[in-house]
Amino acid sequence: MQLRTDLALEAVAMAGETLGDNDRTLSEHEEAGVTVTRLTVKSERAAEVYDKPCGEYVTLSLPPLTDDEKKLLEAATLAAAEIRRFLPQDGTVLTVGLGNRAITPDALGPRAADMVLATRHIRGEFARSVGLSDLRPSAVVVPGVLGQTGTESGELVRGVCDVVQPAAVIAVDALAARSVARLGCTVQVSDTGIAPGAGVGNHRLPLCAETLGVPVIAVGVPTVVDAATVAADCGADAETVERIAPAARRLVVTPREIDLLIGRAARLVAAAINAALQPDYAPLELISLALDS
C-alpha cells in the first residue's frame, strides 16, 4: 500500500535512491534550529516517480510550535525568505486561503489568510499621509469549498485574478503527511502551485501557473495522516498495513490538540507571508492590523 503524502521530501524517502542529479537535486542545511531541505524535481521521470510536478520544494522541519513569539519570528523569518525567493520583485500579490474554516484540520488556509494584511486599497494621498506609501500592494481572498459555494476554489480564484491582475499568487492549504511526527511542525513552500483537496484524495482544479497565468507559490503545513500511516508509525509491517479494511483506509486522522496546532501554524504562516510581502514592517504588528481591519 502506498502511503499518501503531500510532502515532496517524504515522496523522495518513499521512492528510495532511484534517481540521480540529472533528474533531481537534494540539499539540506540547518539554521536557527530549523532543518531546511531543498528539492528540485528536474525531469518528467522524477515527476512521475515522486508524483510531484517539476519545480522546487523547500521543506522547513521545525521544533514543535509554541506561543513563544521569539521562536515564531525566527521560524517565520526563514519561511519568509523562501517565499520571497519565488516572488517577482514588483506587483500585487494575491494570498488565497484554501480550505474549510468549519472543519478544524482544514482551516489552516482561511485562518492564515485572516491574518495577512491586504494593502491594495491603501494608496494615494491617504497612504502617504499615514506613512504607508511603501507597502507592497496585496489582496486576500478565502474562496471557501465546493460544498459551501457550489463553485470550485480554482474557478473563484481565477475570477479574482482577472480583476486584481496579480503578479503572483500565494496559496495556503493544509496538507497530508505520511509521518505523524511531521504534523504541525513542517512547512512546505513550493513554486508548483497546489491542487485543493489532494491531501485527502479529493482532487479539484489546481491553482498553478497554467490555470491562473501567473506564478503560484504554495505554502502548506501537514495537519492529517491516513489511518494506514498511523498503523505504520506504530510498527505494523507492510503486509499488516496492506490488510487494513478498505473502510479504515479511508479514515483521516488528526491530533487531539488540532485546535492549538492550527492556531499556531496559521499564525506562523501569516507572519511569514506578511514578512515576505512587507519586509520593512514587523510581521506580528501586521497580523494585528489585519485582524483589526
Image (cartoon, rainbow, N blue to C red):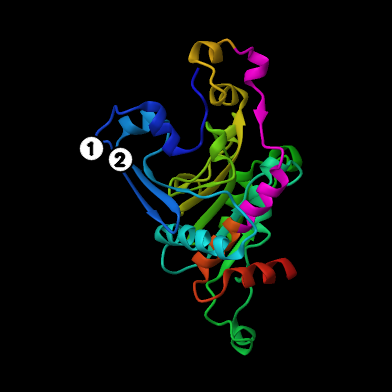
Specify start and end residues of the magenta stretch as a single range.
Answer: 244-267
Query: Residue, x 67% and y 37% (percent of image)?
Result: 255
Query: Residue, x 55% and y 82% (percent of image)?
Result: 133
Q: Is residue 263 magenta?
A: yes
Q: In this figure, which residue is indicated by the disc labeled 1? A: 22
Q: In this figure, which residue is indicated by the disc labeled 2? A: 42
Secondary structure beneath dot 2 equals loop
**Residue type at numbered disc 2:** Lys
User: Where in the figure is residue 35, as x and y percent of width and height?
Assistant: 42, 49
Secondary structure beneath dot 1 equals loop
Query: Residue, x 56% and y 38% (percent of image)?
Result: 205
Q: Is residue 143 visible?
A: no
Do callouts 2 and 1 mark residues in contact (Cβ within 8 Å)?
yes
Query: Residue, x 56% and y 56% (percent of image)?
Result: 161
User: Where in the figure is residue 7, as x and y percent of width and height?
Assistant: 48, 38
Q: On the image, which quarter does residue 197 sit in? A: top right
Cα–Cα span, label 2 and label 1: 7 Å
Left or right for 10, reference 142? left
Front-lying residue, 268 or 201? 268
**Residue type at numbered disc 1:** Asn
Q: Is residue 154 magenta?
A: no
